[in-house]
Amino acid sequence: MAADWLGSIVSVNCGQTLGVYQGRVSAVDQLHQTISLTHPFHNGVKCLVPEVTFRAGDITDLKILEIPVDSRKHNDHQLPDHTAGAGYLPVSHHNGMGKQKLAADSSVPQNISHGAEAKGSSSSRYPSQATPKKNGPKNGQLKARDDECFGEDLEEIPDADFDFEGNLALFDKAAVFEEIETHERRGGGGGARSRGTPSERPPTYRHDENILESEPTVYRRIVLPQPTGKEYCTGPLSGIAPLKLDGCDEPLGDASSGTSGVNAVAALNSGLVVPSISYGLHKKLLCVAEKHGLSTERRLEMSGVCASQMALTLLGGPNRLNPKNVHQRPTVALLCGPHVKGAQGISCGRHLANHEVDAILFLPNFVKMLEPVTNELSLFCRTQGQLVSNIKDLPDCPVDLVINCLDCHENAFLRDQPWYRAAVDWANQNRAPVLSIDPPVGEQAQGIHAKWSLSLGLPLALGEQAGRVYLCDIGIPQKVFREVGINYHSPFGCKFVIPLHST
């Protein structure tokens, strides 16, 4: 009879449109071919209504998850053991396996009973099926402790395993949260749960933001004795994208991973004002730093490391430089002059060659060169880098990157030399982008148009042909800045190279 199925826990599959419902059978109407479930769950989420009713035509599959104990005992008395066979499905019992006949003339509607399945489980799953032990105070204490812990009779636990993955896949988290937000905006959340108007809501923070504000943020932390007029500010740019093989601006691979070393600036350091300084103050700052022990060799090493790190990022970072991509080693041409600026380029080329980059160094032949240039050149010759002194020995095809260190702040007469003009013509005709290290300003500006420029310590007032300006830390102590009259607080944060915006 229909009453035999009341109280059973079933799973009703109504197809993709209506979804899957689970609940306890509260009513079966044989005349109208309907079935009702109380305390229903829809696709793993508890319904807001206490009861739902389904027509037989809407049900594609029905599974019986649990049959009440009274109904199973009643059916066991009516059905003998020899009734196993066609038309009978096993129904799980905690004290044995029973059988229930699901025939066409059953009190359950035919469309509903079609596809119904009762699931059994191993007899070792529940404590009530274990080997009985002697009754005694100990067993009574254990049962009392179990009842106190779990709070419900273990026999009420369904036999079928809950499909966590299936129900989780049916749960639409975005839709549920949207429904909650809509409900609260309409004032249905109550006074205690209301999140208030947008002006009253507490601010939200990212994982890398400091939520403790002890004092206001000061954005102008570097003050010069005499302002020069041009100022920069820190902050992330649109990104240093890895370059293509032919030197075009389109990125090679994933640009997001290639920018992690240079352009990923902490949000807390964005917007800091960095003023430009004159070349005279810049020269004085380096002299005082050298007097305190920051020698030329130390500055060359720091500038070479920072410039090479920026170049490696431009070349593609881990997307381009990894053991699985040895057949696409990038090629970098370094154009250096016979001065300290050229020594910075030679140091950068040495670090690039150490990182499996094909570094081609152009340096003109001079009878006498400065000691820093000689020392850096001696170290570069110990690498796998290539040294050329004639422009004709440079590659005819575009390279991946050109690093310009031809110009000098003081020796402007070098610009009239034939080797200098030939190097400038080669760089301008090559399709590769250009990175300039510590470029000069004003009338001594380089003849090569750069896409990026890397300044040292504090920037100079560079023009538009310098491209995007970046600043690197060369290790000048704070007290050295103060000795030359600069009130200085480091804008670098956790980076050694940061991008600058023109204000």
Image: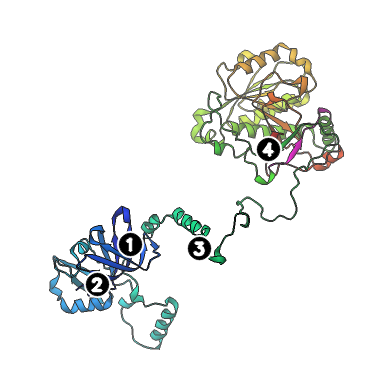
Tell me: 79 left or right of 122.
Answer: left
Residue 454 occupies quadrant: top right
Q: Nearer the viewer, residue 377 or 186?
A: 186
Residue 413 position (above or below residue 487): above
The x and y percentages for residue 376 are 71, 27
Badge 4 density bin: few <14, some 14–19, many ≥20, Cα 10 Å: many
Per the rendering, the mark at residue 21 is 1
Q: CA distance from mark 4 to mark 2?
A: 72 Å
Residue 79 position (above or below residue 173): below
The residue beneath circle 4 is 498
Residue 386 occupies quadrant: top right
Q: Amino acid at mark 2?
A: Trp
Tell me: 477 left or right of 347.
Answer: right
- The count of marks equals 4
The residue beneath circle 3 is 188
The residue beneath circle 2 is 5
